[in-house]
Image: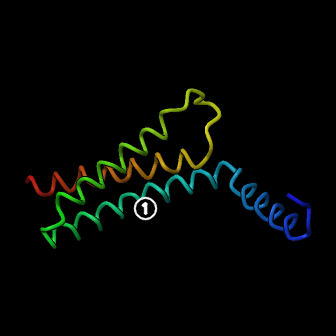
């Protein structure tokens, strides 16, 4: 690719954006935000699917596919020390998602 001013500007902006999240406190806050976002998404999707009652099996299939595909992406890497930051964010999203579904099952079972 040619080094035009636009390419250099975009590359510099991307580097600044990624450099912003190298701070450990910012990474921790993003992980917590993804954990809570996964919790929220699971609650919203399960409540919406439960309201319609026609989409239960389809939504359960999507839940299963999301957790299995994300687990495959997270755990397929052999090098655990050098994993990208988005893998940690995906893992925390999956953990929040699974935790919310577990709590929904406990609420419905009691």
Residue at position x 16%, y 51% in the image = 106
Q: Nearer the viewer, residue 73 or 87?
A: 73
Q: How many numbered dots are placed on residues in this image?
A: 1
Occupied quadrant, residue 2: bottom right
Where residue 90 appears, x then y in whole percent?
49, 49
**Quadrant including the N terminus:** bottom right
Q: Is residue 86 left or right of residue 57?
A: right
Residue at position x 25%, y 53% in the image = 61
Residue lying furthest left: 110
Occupied quadrant, residue 104: bottom left
**Quadrant including the C terminus:** bottom left
Residue at position x 81%, y 61% in the image = 11
Q: Is residue 10 left or right of residue 68?
A: right
Where residue 17 appears, x then y in whole percent?
73, 61
Figure coloring: rainbow
Where is 63 relative to 54, above or below? Answer: above
Residue at position x 65%, y 34% in the image = 82
Where is 33 relative to 70, above or below? Answer: below
Residue designated by label 1: 37
Q: Secondary structure at mark 1?
A: helix
Residue lying furthest top: 78
């Amino acid at each position: 690719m040619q080094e035009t001013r636009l390419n250099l500007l975009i590359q510099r902006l991307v580097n600044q954006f990624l450099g912003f999240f190298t701070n450990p406190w910012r990474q921790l806050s993003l992980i917590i935000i993804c954990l809570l976002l996964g919790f929220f998404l699971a609650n919203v999707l399960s409540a919406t699917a439960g309201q319609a009652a026609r989409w239960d099996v389809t939504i359960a299939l999507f839940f299963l596919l999301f957790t299995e595909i994300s687990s495959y992406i997270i755990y397929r890497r052999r090098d655990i020390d050098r994993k990208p930051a988005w893998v940690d964010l995906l893992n925390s999203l999956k953990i929040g998602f699974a935790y919310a579904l577990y709590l929904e099952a406990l609420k419905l079972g009691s």
